[in-house]
Amino acid sequence: MAEELPKVEITHGAKPTHNPLQGYYRQPKLYIKLPSQGKFYPEGALDVSENGDYAIYAMTAKDELLMKTPDALLSGQGTVEVMQSCMPSLKNAWQMPTIDVDAVLMAIRIASYGETMDVTVDCPECKETNKYGIELTQYLNKAQASEYITEVQIDQLTIHLQPYSYKMLTETNIKSLEQQRIYNIVNDEKMSDQEKIEKFGKSFVTLTEMTVGTVANCINKVVTPEGSVEDKAMIKDFINNASREIFNKIVNTLEVYKERASLPNQNVKCEKCNHEWTMPVTMDQANFFADRS
């Protein structure tokens, strides 16, 4: 009688409970504190740290490819996936307050390529191309220290503010494209005046609605002598019907923080003609993660 062979269990591609390669996975490169201190996040969007420190990992090869994909950057999806990949505590980057975005992206850049970023810029005087090294740590420290303005007093009203979410920021960028579209319509010599008027009107209405909606979304609560209002629909209706003075004061307050949190310019000098000027430093992701400079 033939000897019975031992039974072999077939798993059909089942994943092992422990991957022996886990010890070779990337590790945190640095820890940062968020400018928001973990506030303004909806429930489930962030695993809040007890000590306020958040681990930042270097980008993977997939992350680098996403940061070089124009469509993914324009829609915001690429940036969202990279931030969630490199900051595991961040569960929904669409809901991240924009006051945290620059700090997290700078930390990812430092973790991936180091503290110095080389930029090239043409001298405005002699047009010579110069290369400068920017120390990102100083900008990261400034971003982490930014303090958000949480309320504005207007007569008897106290307007409680919250920063844009990254989703709202992406919509604002689309609004900027709409502004450019209006400019192109007005300057299109091939288009008749009637067509210009019609297209301009439609674009302007869209732009106005987006502006009002963005401002309304930055209001968390309005406190009046009679009580407080937190209903988003009521707040948007209030912004639609508020006086120009109230609307402008809210917008100006939001702009004050934007200016306060912006990256400081860097003083540079041309190596060829010695001309000195101020170079703006921007967080354009398409260029910020363009190479390992």
Image (cartoon, grey):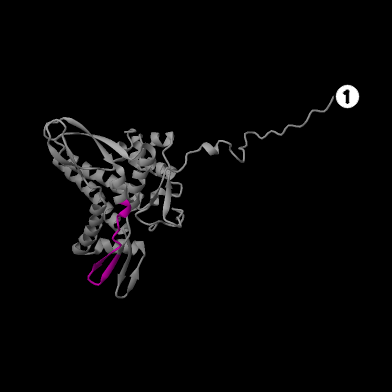
Q: Position of residue 113 (x, y in %)?
A: 36, 37
218 relative position to 24: left or right: left
**Count of labels shown?**
1
Residue that protrudes farthest toward the top in the picture: 2
154 up-or-down from 58: above or below: below
Q: Nearer the viewer, residue 259 or 49?
A: 49
Q: Position of residue 289 (x, y in %)?
A: 33, 37
Residue that protrudes farthest toward the right in the picture: 1
* Residue 12 in view in this figure: yes
Q: Residue at x 52, y 36 (%)?
A: 24
| Highlighted range, magenta | 143-159
Q: Nearer the viewer, residue 248 or 240?
A: 248
Q: Quadrant of residue 248?
A: bottom left
165 relative position to 281: left or right: right
- Queried whether the magenta region covers residue 33, the answer comes back as no
User: In the image, what residue type sits under mark 1?
Assistant: Met
Q: Quadrant of residue 290?
A: top left
Q: Position of residue 106 (x, y in %)?
A: 34, 44
Task: For label 1, count other residues whose C-alpha is less than 10 Å away and answer few (under 14), some (14-19) or many (20+).
Answer: few
Residue that protrudes farthest toward the bottom in the picture: 226
3 up-or-down from 95: above or below: above
Q: Secondary structure at mark 1?
A: loop
Q: Nearer the viewer, residue 159 or 50?
A: 50
* Residue 195 in view in this figure: no
Q: Quadrant of residue 235?
A: bottom left
Q: Which residue is mark 1?
A: 1
Q: Residue at x 23, y 59 (%)?
A: 253
Pick the quarter of the image with the C terminus: top left
- Queried whether the magenta region covers residue 147, the answer comes back as yes
Q: Nearer the viewer, residue 253 or 289?
A: 289
